[in-house]
Amino acid sequence: MSVDTIPIATDDPLNARILSVSEDKMQGFYRNPIRSIAKQAGVSADDVVTRIRAMLEGGTIRRVRQTLMATNLAPGALVAWKVPEARLNEIFDCMFQQDPFSGHVVIRTTDEGKTGARYRLWTTIKVPKPYSLEKHCELLCEKTGAEAFRLMPAKSIFALGVGHVRRRSMEPGDRAEQPAEPRQVEVVELSDLDWQVVMALKREFAPAELQDDPWANRAEEAGLPIEQFFEVAEDLQARKVVGRFSTFLEHSKELTTGERVTRYNALFHWAVPEGREIEAGREVGRHHIMTHCYWREGGPEFGNVNIMGVVHGMERKRVFEHKQAIDDHLAACGIPLGYTNVFWGGRSEIKPSEISPTVYQEWCASIGVDVETMEA
């Protein structure tokens, strides 16, 4: 089959089998992720390489990379920004294009009059130690003209994964037999050797790099024998620094095939009684539809919400049905809701946040900022 005739649609049966594994089932570090995907999907390694390469080149997949638990490498937060409406898209572009430490950049909308409705721009931010998240956001306000921001660092993580293809068939209320296990957020100190491996691990794969043994060149890039590279990577995994090997679909734009991976992106907010955040997060996070679920403090700007999560779907009504099922489950568990809301995603761009202190120092120098003034 020639390159031009390789199917790149997500609903192609072979692609769907591969994506059902490669999107979010490859948790941790694998010495040979290609063969591991092939084994779990029940296909050949050659098919995995051929199809993922074709989908990456064709834009169905936007990136392939080893993710890291960035919250364990650099302090981070979800940030809601209040910006002048007339400059919303301009400031969106600044955040996405000019700040290497902003990851997800999304314009969100909720019903007029709802708490927090004026906070239209939402980003994720990571700022490596010893620099300050708050000072970084104040600098972005100065550079972009944003009027105000609300920092919402994660206190605990209950769900983190994508898997848009396998989530298409989920029914409202589908959930694990047991509540989700909370993951604590704690920044891990890395040695110079660790950083060598981290920087080689996290870089996106170009299509030509996707092969049966994808780490050989990365070990060479890090200046290490392959066995030592593996040992350091596995030690990083043991310290909860490594996330998953993943193919990220282009889910916010129409693909070249004319399909949409997903149409609606909803950020759910729940305010539960103080002291019951872990219990509530575990019950929300056990629902399979949740791609993200965190304990974050929204403060008075957002009705004092403390559990937040993201759901994607093809139909707005269906997304509401998923939320209602979760609300009903919380009620059945005896967890009252003081407030709840939905922020709908519109324009969005996603890139991995930089997490290296060296990169932060270089960025500050490039914009004429004394990096010492940015220290926490």
Image (tube, rainbow, N blue to C red):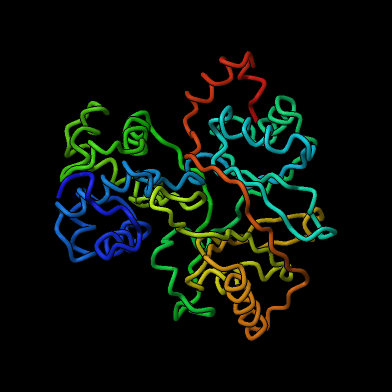
Q: Residue 2's x, y, as percent?
A: 16, 46
**Does residue 358 appear left or right of residue 64 in this picture?**
right
Residue at image location 45% in from the left, 77% down from the top: 176
Residue at image location 64% in from the left, 79% down from the top: 330
* Residue farthest to the right, as pictured: 113
**Does residue 150 appear left or right of residue 60 in this picture?**
right
> On the image, which quarter does residue 373 sit in?
top right
In-front residue for pair 359/253: 253
**Does residue 297 appear left or right of residue 48 in this picture?**
right
> On the image, which quarter does residue 266 sit in?
bottom right
* Residue farthest to the bottom, as pictured: 332
In-front residue for pair 115/360: 115
Question: Is 98 located above or below residue 159 in the figure?
Answer: above
Tally the marks: 0
Residue at image location 31% in from the left, 48% down from the top: 55
Q: Residue 190's x, y, as percent?
A: 41, 36
Q: Residue 134's x, y, as percent?
A: 69, 35
Q: Residue 87's x, y, as percent?
A: 75, 34
In the picture, the quarter occupied by the C terminus is top right
Question: Is 291 located above or below residue 8 in the figure?
Answer: below
